[in-house]
Image (cartoon, grey):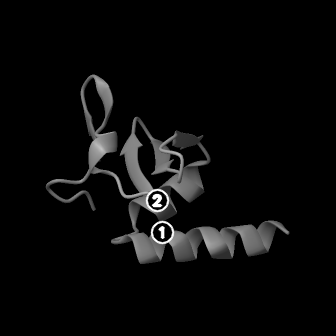
């Protein structure tokens, strides 16, 4: 769910980022053209972006209603892969 004022959004031209509105070390996400984009700003103000194409994982991300759900999803996902 993308809320008004959320620093990551999409439109027909692609992904829009507002780094000045991002909290450091907080994970943001959006879905664009059946891909999930994960973005966070680290402690040095560098943007880190990751693209996920795996369809079932993208669908699970799409269902996350807040950042807590998203972080839990990735914790569980990483546990399964290790």
Residue lying at 47% horizontally and 44% vertically, measured from the top left: 45
Reading the chain from its start, which is encountered first: label 2 or label 1?
2
What x and y, as percent, mark residue 9? 27, 43
Q: Is residue 79 left or right of residue 59?
A: right
Q: Is residue 56 left or right of residue 77?
A: left
Residue lying at 37% horizontally and 48% vertically, measured from the top left: 30
* Disc 2 target residue: 27
What x and y, as percent, mark residue 43? 53, 53
Residue lying at 85% horizontally and 69% vertically, measured from the top left: 82
Q: Is residue 42 left or right of residue 12?
A: right
**What is the secondary structure assignment of the residue under circle 2?**
loop
Number of the front mark, 2 or 1? 2
User: Is disc 1 surrounded by few (<14), some (14 to 19) or many (20+) residues within 10 Å?
Assistant: some
The numbered dot on residue 70 is: 1
| In the depicted structure, whether residue 69 falls above or below residue 25 | below
Looking at the image, do the residues carrying marks 2 and 1 touch, with CB atoms under 8 Å apart?
Answer: yes
Q: To which quarter of the image does residue 57 belong? A: bottom right
């Amino acid at each position: 769910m993308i809320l008004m004022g959320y620093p990551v959004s999409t439109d027909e031209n692609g992904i829009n980022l507002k780094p000045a509105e991002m909290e450091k070390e907080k994970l943001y996400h959006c879905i664009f053209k059946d891909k999930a984009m994960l973005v966070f700003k680290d402690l040095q103000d560098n943007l880190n972006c990751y693209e996920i194409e795996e369809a079932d994982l993208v669908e699970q991300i799409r269902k996350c209603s807040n950042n807590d759900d998203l972080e839990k999803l990735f914790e569980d996902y990483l546990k399964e892969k290790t």
